[in-house]
Image (cartoon, grey):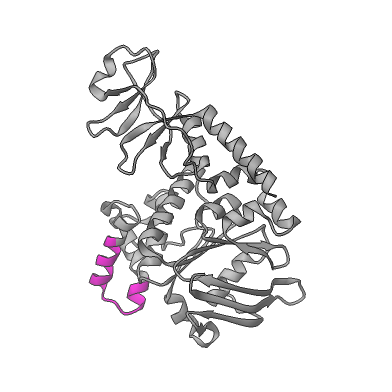
């Protein structure tokens, strides 16, 4: 069990004349991990998040951060000690990207020059070109704005990062990119992140642990995503996770036993040659660029997603189903071609895993 960074102790938020928004919440959030609050609208997940930095004050109970009772901390100072990212990036439209990122360091007394230098460094950290620093928020795409929002939250190097549905307003492709970017950042920075979403898929992709909230502000289950998918605590959690949780569970089954087959390869200059079978096109470093088709050997065809040894069954299935040849491309840790996997063999292994799991339960 990771050392606790945030503790909720019998925390309730009761608005006048209504049901509790949060009802007797007790939980411990581990240091350096991503904890996701998930649930339907009106279940208290956002209220719970906002009580951590006192944007909402609890009616009763205690919240501690790194052992300190947040109610004893001045609210403004508490908020500046944490990063906060919201659904709309919340950027100030009249300030440049660099000045938006530098906001909290400037409030903390850092000089303008030092704060801007830190802001420029953070553009690279969140995967944005340095030239964007001079632009204004209206000149950025939605995904770029959210990356700037993350950079601003990281600017004062806070130990805790609060994220309130930060990716829900962008399209699914950008959302997936932002999720992967957040996981990359977390591997490098190891912040304590509390992330709110209504999407169980997003919760299981991002969360080291997932807290499922039920309507009425009750904590229905708090566990690793694998456990929530495999063994929902009650009917509410099972219904919320959805009937297709068997497929989602594939994300946690390693695919070590999948056979990797040899495949014909060609290097990029050979694309004009006639191909009688599908061939993986390689660059000079033996890394796959795509496929050459037996029907048209002159064009490079995008290859779909790649499968790395040690990845999960779900990744294996994605690689096979997204490939134009029906063969999933397997690469080693250096990104070099290791072979291919066959969709029918992946599906057979999935079926075998499902039967084993059913027999075990």
- Left or right of 203 in this view: 176: left
Span highlighted in magenta in the image: 104-121
- Left or right of 269 in this view: 203: right
Residue at image x 58%, y 54%? Answer: 226
Residue at image x 27%, y 15%? Answer: 272
Residue 324 visible within the image: yes
> For residue 217: magenta?
no
- Left or right of 183 in this view: 253: right
Which is more toward the observer, 314 or 309? 309
Q: Name which quarter of the figure residue 219 lies in.
A: bottom right
Task: Please say if 301 is above or below 175.
Answer: above
Task: Please say if 10 is above or below 273.
Answer: below
Task: Please say if 60 is above or below 321.
Answer: below
Residue at image x 71%, y 75%? Answer: 15
Residue 325 point in image, percent of width and height: 45, 23
Residue 81 point in image, percent of width and height: 42, 76
Which is more toward the observer, 260 or 127? 260
> For residue 106: magenta?
yes
Residue 94 visible within the image: no
Residue 52 point in image, percent of width and height: 54, 75
Residue at image x 72%, y 63%? Answer: 215
Which is more toward the observer, 154 or 318? 318
């Amino acid at each position: 069990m990771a050392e606790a960074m945030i503790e909720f102790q019998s925390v309730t938020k009761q608005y006048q004349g209504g049901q509790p928004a949060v009802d007797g919440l007790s939980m411990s959030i581990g240091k350096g991990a991503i904890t996701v609050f998930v649930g339907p609208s009106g279940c208290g997940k956002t209220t719970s998040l906002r009580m951590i930095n006192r944007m909402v004050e609890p009616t009763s109970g205690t919240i501690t951060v790194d052992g300190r009772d947040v109610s004893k901390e001045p609210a403004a100072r508490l908020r500046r000690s944490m990063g906060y990212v919201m659904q709309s990036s919340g950027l100030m439209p009249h300030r440049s990207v660099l000045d938006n990122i530098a906001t909290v360091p400037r409030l903390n007394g850092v000089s303008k020059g030092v704060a801007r230098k830190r802001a420029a460094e953070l553009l690279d950290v969140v995967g944005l070109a340095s030239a964007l620093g001079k632009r204004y928020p209206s000149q950025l795409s939605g995904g770029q704005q959210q990356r700037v929002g993350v950079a601003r939250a990281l600017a004062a190097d806070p130990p805790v990062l609060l994220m309130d549905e930060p990716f829900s307003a962008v399209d699914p492709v950008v959302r997936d990119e932002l999720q992967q970017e957040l996981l990359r950042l977390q591997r490098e920075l190891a912040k304590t992140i509390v992330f709110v979403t209504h999407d169980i898929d997003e919760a299981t992709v991002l969360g080291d642990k997932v807290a499922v909230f039920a309507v009425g502000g009750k904590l229905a289950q708090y566990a690793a995503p694998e456990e929530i998918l495999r063994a929902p605590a009650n009917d509410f959690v099972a219904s919320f996770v959805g009937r297709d949780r068997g497929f989602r569970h594939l994300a946690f089954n390693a695919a070590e036993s999948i056979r990797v087959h040899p495949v014909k390869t060609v290097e990029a200059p050979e694309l004009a040659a006639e191909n009688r079978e599908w061939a993986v096109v390689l660059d000079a470093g033996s890394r796959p660029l795509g496929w050459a088709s037996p029907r048209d050997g002159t064009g490079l065809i995008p290859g779909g997603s790649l499968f790395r040894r040690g990845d999960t069954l779900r990744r294996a299935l994605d690689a096979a189903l997204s490939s134009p040849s029906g063969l999933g491309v397997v690469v080693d840790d250096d990104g070099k071609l290791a072979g291919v996997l066959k969709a029918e063999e992946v599906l057979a292994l999935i079926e075998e895993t499902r039967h084993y799991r059913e027999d075990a339960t």
